[in-house]
Amino acid sequence: MSIMNELKAEITRLSRKEIKKELEPVKRVNAAQRGLIANLRRDVTALQKEVARLQKAAGKPAVPAAPEADGTKGFWMSGKGVRSLRKRLGITQIELSKLAEVSHQSIVRWEKTAGKIPFRKKETPAKMQQIRAMDKRTAWAALGKKRKGK
């Protein structure tokens, strides 16, 4: 029995030695790659500092922001906001879709959206901003709707 244990121990030792020998080139390549990555990180940091210094010297950002001609930069609405806007104006989903020039299904989908609404058309945020600035009378006039009793 002890000869079997000795053989197992020797086989294990030789196997580990062979594995270590086979992995040595991989370890060298890995270490070299880590060194290259560290050098690249240092280069990127140095370049970022240089860009910041040049921006400061020039007095303007390197990447100018695209100007929004219609003033909708930063404008967003949530589904809850669309629903409350519609209720405030006293209009239906279909009527809001006519004002915003989108489909009825878009309004339904927007109202179900939990967070910020991803508008698909570029002109939709500007239209929604105009609608949000309306009062009930203006919205009804835009729709050609008449108040009850008049």
Image: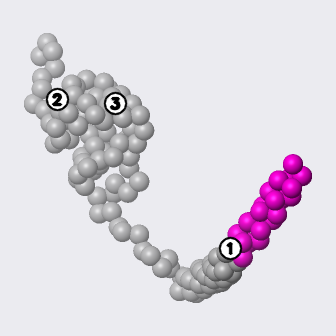
Please state, as top left, top right, bottom left or bottom right, where the C terminus lies in the image.
top left
Tell me which label, 2 or 3, sits earlier in the chain: 2
Q: Are marks 1 and 3 in contact (CB under 8 Å)?
A: no
In the rendered image, residue 116, in percent from the top left (x then y), is placed at 40, 42
Q: Amino acid at mark 2?
A: Ile
How crowded is the residue under tag 1: few (<14 C-alpha within 10 Å), some, or many (20+)?
few
Q: Is residue 78 visible?
A: yes
In the rendered image, residue 25, in percent from the top left (x then y), is placed at 66, 80
Q: Nearer the viewer, residue 81 or 51?
A: 51
What main secondary structure does the magenta stretch of the protein show? helix
Q: Nearer the viewer, residue 129 or 116?
A: 116
Q: Nearer the viewer, residue 26 or 147?
A: 26
Residue highlighted by disc 2: 94
Residue in the image at 28% along x and 34% along y: 109
Label of residue 112 in the image: 3
* Magenta extent: 1-21
Helix or strand or loop: what does disc 1 sit on?
helix
Tell me which label, 1 or 3, sits earlier in the chain: 1
Helix or strand or loop: what does disc 2 sit on?
helix
